[in-house]
Image (cartoon, coloured by chain):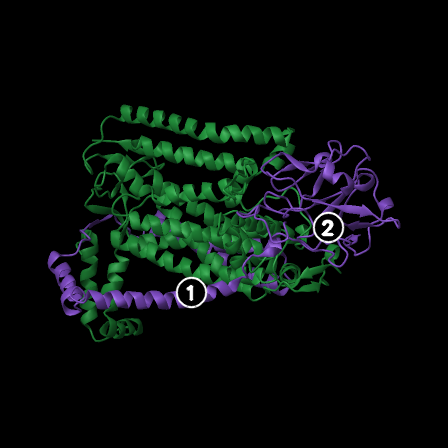
Amino acid sequence: MSQRTEPERTERAEPERTERTEPERTELERLGAWLDERTGAATITRNVLRKVFPDHWSFLLGEIALFCYVVLVATGVFLTFFFAADTRSVTYEGPYPPLRGESVSAAFDSIMRLTFEVRAGLLMRQIHHWAALVFVVAIVVHICRVFFTGAFRRPREINWLVGVGLLLLALAAGLTGYSLPDDLLSGTGLRIVYSVVFAIPFIGPWLAYLVFGGEFPTAELIGRLYVFHIMLLPALTIGLIAAHLGIMWIQKHTQFRGERARETNVVGRHFWPGQAFRSLGMFFVTAAGLALLGGLVQINPVWIYGPFLPYAVSSPAQPDWYVGWLEGALRIGPNWEPTILGVTIPSPFLPGILLPAIVFGGFALWPFIEARLTGDHRVHHLLDLPWQAPGRLAVGAATLTLFLVLTLAGGNDVLAVTLHVEVEDLTRAFRVLVFVAPPLVGVVAYRLAVERARRAGPLGPPGGLALHRTATGGFEETE
Amino acid sequence: MTDPDRRSERIVAALFAVTAVTGVGLLGLYLAGGQTQLEGVLLAIALGSLGIGVAIWAQELMTTPIAIEERHSLESDPVIAGELKGALDEEAGFTRRRMLVGMLLAAFGGLAAALAIPVLSLGPAPGRELFTTGWRSGKRLVGLDGQPVRAGDLAVDGVVTVFPEDAAGSADSQTLLIRVPPGSLRLSAERASWAPDGYVAYSKICTHAGCPVGLYRAAERQLICPCHQSTFDVLTGANPVFGPAARALPQLPIRLQPDGTFIATGDFPEPVGPAFWDITAQTPDGR
């Protein structure tokens, strides 16, 4: 491994080497030598610790997601000690007066006990839920960074696909975890999920029965969600995280154009100590933010929603933020339910199955789609700034606008009350907006990017352009 | 050690001290009985001080020069790739024994199918139950408490959730009994007798995504699903008038008994709840 060592460092290394030849070694050094003789660990460790990490704030976004996951696993393990994945009916006899004497499921009862009777239980629950929400935020922002800078281009298509898999797993883990308390709000959400699965032609009812164990609501459901939430999904997630980091390690980081940055090198700081300590600091700060949210901001107060009852419903009913766009699509979806040759296409199929299939399909295949569209199949280690690829910027901006409009539509009842308008009028407005806003934003973004690129003049050859990072994180061009 | 260095060092040390103190404070709070908000704040201070301290340490006190690492092509050396190909082809002889390889794949396929089949045990096949509910001719309408609902119990524009007499709380039989002024109903001719004295009963399960249709707007005599705002017109057979639902809420035929209670005169005429691909399929008994 060829590395440029700073002169100052080499000087410092000399006296160390002479010390090492002396017979007097510390306990730690002896242990190190013992391990190295048996494993060659010193070489591996040196390679790991001396890996170069580009120094840019946007590269920390993926790390925040990783740190949220660590917090999720830690708090989640605590929660499993108290949760009962059991839908059998029990009478609530805990300290929360409004529900005392009510018939609730054992799952709901265990969450109530965890909330009101286990010390620090509510804190752990709320940190866990907040960590899940921030986890998906961090993933989405990280994906935006990777997308808008073109970091997914050859040779990183595989890691893009792994990342898409991680996003899907995060969504699945969020949905299954949110549903475990067996409260009225999440029960309604499961009912909708069941109905959407039901809507798939030919295999829908059969698939819904396989997953849910029969006609909704079933006694098996909470137990099954639990197996997914604490076993299958985490195992897959940890596996894919390992793959994601491993591939990144082998392929090395991308980097922004800069004075010394080339397609053939990586400019940054060694993993140890600079990057490692920065990341460690970032981990603790992330955990602190989640602790503050979990302590001060109430989240998913299931004792207010009450236990799930199949004939009851609450209003308004909003899911966790990352499902909001699908909820919005269902709300503004057309009331089409054609029957063709005896086969009915249920109304939720278009917004609930087809739309997400197209969105996630296009999203997963984007590196290949873009390469086909632009004809650019070259290897890229240097990143674009968003405006340097106007077409990509337009597609990304339009997609984000689509998500925004749909998410707002998912809260149309709340918005109607806030804005003092009829929910029907709002729904009609969203039905127009969902087709008008994304292309409009896409075109504007494209125009602005082209204009920006025109003013900046032609790009230099790869690596030849000199961009200086300013103290504020922006860029200025220099010769 | 320079002066700014010493200053940074003092700040980092102070931050670590804050973490140590708040950590102990957190322990004390826990032993004293705990308080969620305070726990969260103390934990945040402890972790935050530690994080900021570590970050300042890295930023100000560590020598972290800019380093440059060269990239290398990830592609394998052609000689090595050739050796791999040789090992796969020549030594194992896969290319020469196509028939064996084919049979091996067939064996794997058969075994995989056999091992995958138990997945089917996870759920029964959907059958007749999608087309039926707990309602039968002669079943009395009862409330959630299991007590029969009587004609006098409901004022005009009153709504109550009812169930078959032996299945209070049942998910697929939940039904709304609504009282509207007699004569205001405009039902089809064959359903004229289904709503005695302005009492009309519709399935409570939304035909869009299955939520309980829990809201009744008395002024317009509309039922509204709070999940996706599908709106149904009570007077014309619960036809959808707004939102994503495409089918009417199925109507339950009911009869008023001399003792003031209600009985069903049959099950719903079509499947309740969200649609599925063969919802229009005819079942042996013509339903």
How many residues crowd mark 2 within 10 Å: few (<14), some (14–19), many (20+)? some
- Secondary structure at numbered mark 1: helix
- The residue lying furthest to the right in this view is B259
Residue at x 37% of width, y 34% of height: A395
Give the residue at mark 2.
B266
In the rendered image, residue A77, in percent from the top left (x then y), is placed at: 51, 64
Horizontal relation, residue B254 to residue B72: left or right: right
Residue A398 place in picture, x, y as percent: 41, 33
At label 2, which amino acid type do we have?
Gly
Q: Identify the secondary structure beneath mark 2.
A: loop
Residue A286 placed where, x, y %?
A: 46, 51
Q: Which mark is residue A112?
A: none
Does residue A219 show up? yes
Determine whether A22 is above or below A171 in the image. below
Q: CA distance from mark 2 to mark 1?
A: 42 Å
Number of marks: 2
Q: Nearer the viewer, residue B98 or A365?
A: B98
Question: Residue A461, located in which quarter of the rendered image?
Answer: top left
Q: Amino acid at mark 1?
A: Ala
Q: Is residue A277 above or below residue B228?
A: below
| Chain depicted in green | A
Chain B shade: purple
Toward which corner of the image does residue A83 lie, by quadrant?
A: bottom right
Q: Mark 1 = which residue?
A: B116
Residue A23 figure quarter:
bottom left
Q: Mark 2 and mark 1, same subunit?
A: yes
Q: Is residue B199 left or right of residue A362?
A: right
Q: Position of residue B82 (x, y in %)?
A: 12, 60
| Residue name at image x 20 percent, y 43 percent | A263
Q: Foreground residue, A95 or B15?
A: A95
Picture residue at 25% right of the left edge, 52% below the top? A251
Q: Give me the chain letter of mark 1.
A: B
